[in-house]
Amino acid sequence: MRRLLLAGIASVLLVTGGVANAISSPVHTFEVGLLAPPTSWTTNPPVSYAPGASIYDVFNFSVPTASTFFNVSLDILSYAGFPITNFTSVLTGAAATPIFTLTGPTQSYAGTLDSGTYVLTVTGTANATVGGQYNATLGTIAAVPEPEAYAMFLVGIGLIGAVARRRRRALGAA
């Protein structure tokens, strides 16, 4: 009887230890790679989970230049109104401090990132009846010049024109 009890306790510890290990490591790891502007990356097909499954996904990517404009969008594909619960995403950089944390069925973030390596972690729980799916889109956008840059360009063109005109006059007088 005692052996049976010890065997039962050992099997329970083994099973719960296996579940804890499965949850503590990512279910899906996506190696997105370098997001050089303008680049967009999307999960295709959507990320799917069985009914009641714990969601823990990791997206690894890097940005080549400082002040790169970055956007991320996460959308739950809900079936019959049953969304993924506790749907959360966290972006961390090299220092492992969160840059942003988003929650809810539709998430989006837009901002600038410095050059480096980043990790987007997505967690939640799929619906117990129908499971769950979501789409993720990561992208970078080429920088748009500021109005001051255009003004400096026009001033530079004007100065080049003035120098050319002055030289032409100097050559005509000689």
Image (cartoon, helix red, strand yellow):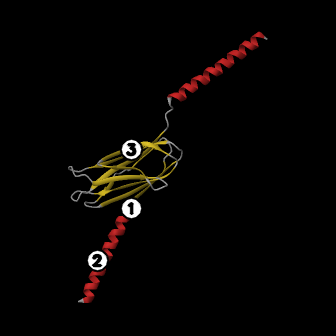
Q: Which mark is residue 71?
A: none
In terms of secondary structure, where does tag 2 sit?
helix
List x then y, in percent, for residue 162: 66, 18
Spatial CA distance of label 1 from label 3 is 22 Å
Instruction: Give me the disc on residue 109.
Output: 3
> As drawn, which residue projects farthest toward the top?
173
Amino acid type, callout 3: Tyr
Q: Label 3 crowding class (10 Å Cα cut-off): few <14, some 14-19, many 20+?
A: some
Q: Nearer the viewer, mark 1 or mark 3?
A: 3
Total numbered labels placed on residues in the image: 3
Residue holding disc 1: 26
Is 125 in front, or is 40?
125
Q: Secondary structure at mark 1?
A: loop
Could you tell me which residue is drawn at 38 percent across and 44 percent down? 109
Quadrant where the N terminus sits is: bottom left
Q: Residues within 10 Å of mark 2 (few under 14, many from 20)?
A: few
Give the left or right position of residue 172, taking residue 11 as reference. right
Which of the two labelled residues, at mark 1 and mark 2, occupies the earlier sequence position? 2
Q: Residue at x 75, y 14 (%)?
A: 170
Q: Residue furthest right?
A: 174
Residue position marked by numbered label 2 in the rendering: 12
Q: Is residue 122 left or right of residue 126?
A: right
Q: CA distance from mark 1 to mark 2?
A: 23 Å
Of label 1 and label 3, which has the lower sequence position?
1
Image position, residue 165 (x, y; %): 68, 15
Sequence-wise first label, 3 or 2: 2
Amino acid carrying mark 2 in the image: Val
